[in-house]
Image (tube, rainbow, N blue to C red):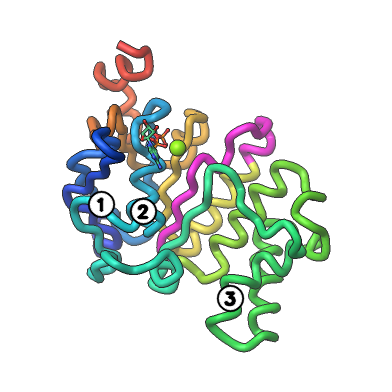
Amino acid sequence: MSGREILLRAEAVGKRFGGFTALQGIDLELRAGERLGLIGPNGSGKSTFVNCISGDFAAHDGQVTLAGKPLAGLKPHRRARLGLARTFQLPQPFTSLSVLENVRVPLLFSGEAAEASRRALDCLEQVELAGKADKLPKELTQVEQRRLELARAIALRPQLLIADEAMAGLSHAEVDQIIALLLRLNAAGTAVIMIEHIMRAVTAFAERLIVFVAGRKIADGPPQAVLALREVEDAYLGK
Ligand code: ADP
Ligand code: MG
């Protein structure tokens, strides 16, 4: 991937909640099409970092650019237009809308209605949910709800998809389904940041790994080398 252009650049990103520093001095360069794993203990700042990139936290320290464009001041939907998509740790569907309508929502402002419906169905096919298009989200199983969350995220054909613990609570076979889905999206050109506690998913998917501990990035490199680091092991053992 080293020949590809920089897609996302984060410089000195930090976030405080009152007097508490949740994130500090995060630098990251991600190339187009890259598969990055982001790991770290609970509370280490992973979701906070996603929220800073996605615009869900309006104010933070530092700078983030996507394909060279500064993201500061842009609301989440504007960032989505620029090619940035994220999923939430807890799926957040519109509960009163059908599965298909949930995927259409992000598309409605960017084209005509018939085209939005076609694209939404295409996204549902990609996550193997087309057969459930008319169901309500609550009628889906847990893994189907995760797949719906991913379908909504990919509706606008993102250049970068950030999946925040998209596999939590799933069975071994269901985790494999989500990994396969993310690999297919990546093969079609989408860069992916996978935030995940399930280590076998991270090592199966990521070509590069970064580690957060207490709001700081403590490692960045090839997965096997990063996982062999003493400070990474210590972080997970709580030392
Ligand atoms: P992770 O995703 O790595 O588990 P988070 O980014 O969710 O960690 O949280 C990092 C730290 O910031 C935690 O101590 C958490 O309690 C705190 N935090 C996260 N979001 C908020 C918020 N909206 N208000 C106050 N504290 C928060
Ligand atoms: Mg989190």
The first of marks 2 and 3 along the sequence is 2
Q: Disc 3 marks which residue?
A: 107
Q: Which stretch is magenta?
A: 159-176
Q: Confirm or deny contact between disc 2 and disc 1 (CB under 8 A).
A: yes
- Name the residue type under label 3: Leu
Q: Taking 6 as reference, is 55 left or right?
A: right
Residue located at (48% from left, 44% from top) = 164
Q: Secondary structure at mark 2?
A: loop
Separation (CA) of disc 3 from disc 1: 28 Å
Separation (CA) of disc 2 from disc 1: 7 Å
- Name the residue type under label 1: His
Frontmost residue, 183 versus 117:
117
Frontmost residue, 157 versus 186:
157
Q: Disc 2 marks which residue?
A: 57
The image position of residue 56, as x and y in percent, is 41, 56
Residue located at (36% from left, 53% from top) = 57
